Image: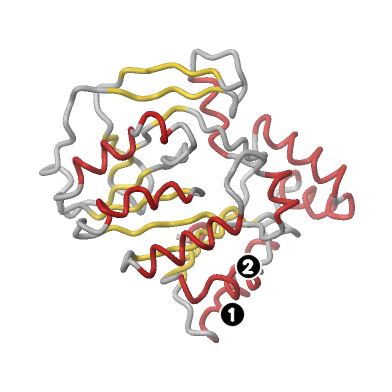
Amino acid sequence: MIAQDYTRVKDYLNKTKLKSLDYVINPYVGCPHKCLYCYAAYMSSFSKHSEGWGDFIDVKCTNKKINTFKIKNKKVMISTVTDPYNYFEKEFCVTRKILEQLVNSEALISIVTKSDLILRDLDLLKQMKSVETALSICILDEDLKNKLEPSSPSVEQRIQTLKVLKSEGIKTICSISPIIPGLTDYEKIINMTKDYVDEYQFDKLDLRSSFKTKMFNFIKQEYSALIPLYDSIYNKKTSDYFEKIADDIINYCNKNNIKYNICYRN
């Protein structure tokens, strides 16, 4: 049972320190996907909930309209610490109401999700001057996906969503993020999705705080042979693994004429 509440905010639009963006919009606080590796779990400490990350959702509400003049030619991402199309969006439609305000803006809109619910808003996306949609896929095996992302949409749903978005003329991105050491096979993901994807984005798995313990426990139980690798990356803080992965991605993508962005090297 997910604890639900409303939270009033001054503005949906927030300035960000992220290098590649100007503003972010997070329609919800919390995310029910319950991804074991979720970096946004630190947000629990800023909430009034006793429940852990993944077990609560706050629906943001405000009477203030988004200032579209302020974001003209600016990069705006929906979202960075929640999925804007988590399954509560079906009921509350906060993301849709936000898109209705942005539809005629001249902002550069990026939407990141794991959900096929984004297809509900195709009518708005097709009216936007500049919008790109990113579906996050870091695992292809459905059984493993269910262990790492227990309440998220299936991998097949995400691939089909990319296919529909592409066919409707919407720019598509496959976000291979996070790259989970020893488990993410980026070449297979690309091969399964390349016909529907305009660009690939890659980011590494960062582990800290309580979810570091959760991931280490999971790896110990399910993939014990990977423990030395995880110890090297996350305890000894060596960078060799992700640097080699980045070099391999560059070589593979250049060889196959694939557009890409390695976020952790920006």
In the foreground, 190 or 118: 118
Q: Please give the residue where the numbered disc 1 appears in the rendered image.
A: 252
Location of mark 2 (residue): 186
| 117 lies left or right of 253 | left
**Residue 87 x %, y %:** 49, 36
Label count reads: 2
Q: Is residue 48 above or below residue 78?
A: above
In the displayed structure, 167 sits above or below 107; it is: below
Q: Residue at x 52, y 33 (%)?
A: 31
Q: In terms of depth relative to the viewer, which is nearer, 37 or 264?
A: 37
Hey, what amino acid is under mark 2?
A: Tyr
Residue kind at label 1, given as amino acid type: Tyr
Residue 8: which disc? none
Q: Are marks 1 and 2 in contact (CB under 8 Å)?
A: yes
* Rendered image quadrant of residue 108: bottom left
Judged from the image, the secondary structure of the residue bearing numbered disc 2 is helix
Q: Residue sitting at 14 percent across and 50 percent down?
A: 104
Residue at disc 1, secondary structure: helix
The image position of residue 198, as x and y in percent, is 41, 71
The N terminus: image quadrant: top right
Residue depicted at x 60% and y 17%: 51
The residue shown at (48%, 56%) is 135
Observer-side mark, 1 or 2, equals 2
Left or right: 23, with 212 as reference point = left
Residue lying at the far bottom of the rendered structure: 255
Q: Looking at this view, is 260 or 56 the one in front?
A: 56
Query: What scheme was used to colour the molecule?
Result: secondary structure
Relative to the observer, which residue lies in front, 113 or 245?
113
In percent of width and height, residue 49 lies at 54, 14
